[in-house]
Image (spheres, rainbow, N blue to C red):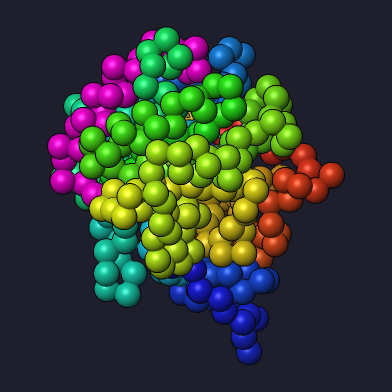
Amino acid sequence: MSTMLQWPASRPARPGDPLVDSFGRVHSDLRVSLTDRCSLRCTYCMPEQGNLWLERSTLLDAAEIEAIARVAALDGVDTFRLTGGEPLLRRDLAEIVRRLAALTVGGRPVEVSMTTNGIGLAGRIDELAAAGLSRVNISLDTVRADRFAELTKRDRLADVLDGIRAAAASGLRPLKLNTVAMRGVNDDELHDLVDLAVEHGAELRFIEQMPLDAGHTWDRSTMLTRDEILETLSARWRLTEVDGRGDSPAERFHLDGGPHTVGVIAAVTAPFCGACNRLRLTADGQVRNCLFARDELDLRRVLRSELSGTERDAALDSVLRASVLGKQAGHGIDDPEFLQPGRGMNAIGG
Ligand code: SAM
Ligand code: SF4
């Protein structure tokens, strides 16, 4: 939950204080990327070939991820979202979940969720739920096998659908499906995708495409907007806004009065930066204060330094705090000077 605080207070911040930026935004959500590798090659996320993968030796292991998460939790971070790349490619995923799910903030367990393409989820969901995973978001942009293969460069729609079925059958709730809505690619399938979500007791969330593709083909003037998505949905359903959006990036709507809902994440045309409470940890241990940040700070160097115990934790804390303090007011996509980040979405962690 995002809160606004006036800071600096009368003394310098120290470990255990909330992570407040210079605009008063309190950071309580850490997106943890576990790998830059993936079983798919979604065109808006990463190139099909020629990827320069992160060196394996630079990837944080489960204990290192836990060490950072522990410091973040002490500072009030109570929501951890595992992402990538594809987090299911990590063999030690259940171990990571177990370590993070054991953390508490104010005596309450933190939430550990995961964003995944669903491939291989069916065989692992029980183990992950037992390890303490709270819920999953599964990404799916089309229900047509040929289109899926074209869009992801892999013929694996059936595997994703298996994953969605397994998630629906598990006790993990709420279940969400994420769809990047794209003009001329899947804009004729918005109704079908919502139907699929409803059938599985999930909420579909349409995401506006952001300029994060390796090919730099994104174009503001041709992207499918929130308004267009809502217009298409309104042709079939009566949409009424769900109360209490809070700091959620998604605007949510009841379909024909409920109980089913749909969401739209208008990251480009109606940015929610003013309520942003998120930080990102890359798989190689760099902290980023925004998807679109041009700078990152090195936590891996601290983890692998000679420092130990309290000193190391204090150093991790000060790097986290420096990242938060350097955060800009907004992502600046509309700024004429805007530059895409150096890393692709798969290496940042979506
Ligand atoms: N592989 C997992 C998956 O696809 O869910 C997790 C990582 S993926 C980078 C996380 C989310 O980012 C997915 O829902 C994906 O659709 C979204 N995403 C990737 N590139 C995007 C872009 N250029 N614009 C908007 N969303 C994007
Ligand atoms: Fe892989 Fe997810 Fe990127 Fe698609 S969006 S290529 S599934 S990391």
| Dominant secondary structure (helix, strand or loop) of the stretch shown in magenta | helix
- Residue 124, image x and y in percent? 21, 31
Q: Residue at x 29, y 19 (%)?
A: 159
Residue farthest right in this picture: 336
Task: Compare residues 67 and 118 and report the one nearer the observer.
Answer: 118
Numbered range of the magenta stretch? 149-174
- Residue 332, image x and y in percent? 74, 50
Picture quarter containing residue 141?
A: top left
Residue farthest bottom in this picture: 10
Relative to 222, residue 317 above or below: below
- Residue 158, image x and y in percent? 29, 17
On the rendered structure, is 332 left or right of 228?
right
Relative to 186, residue 269 above or below: below
Quarter of the image containing the N terminus? bottom left
Q: Is residue 87 visible?
A: no
Q: Is residue 289 visible?
A: yes
Task: Compare residues 8 and 177 and report the one nearer the observer.
Answer: 177
On the rendered structure, is 117 left or right of 249?
left
Q: Residue at x 25, y 58 (%)?
A: 102
- Residue 116, image x and y in percent? 37, 34
Relative to 1, residue 155 above or below: above
Total numbered labels placed on residues in the image: 0
Magenta includes 344?
A: no
Q: Residue at x 46, y 59 (%)?
A: 248
Magenta includes 168?
A: yes
Task: Compare residues 154 and 109 and report the one nearer the observer.
Answer: 154
Q: Residue at x 58, y 40 (%)?
A: 228
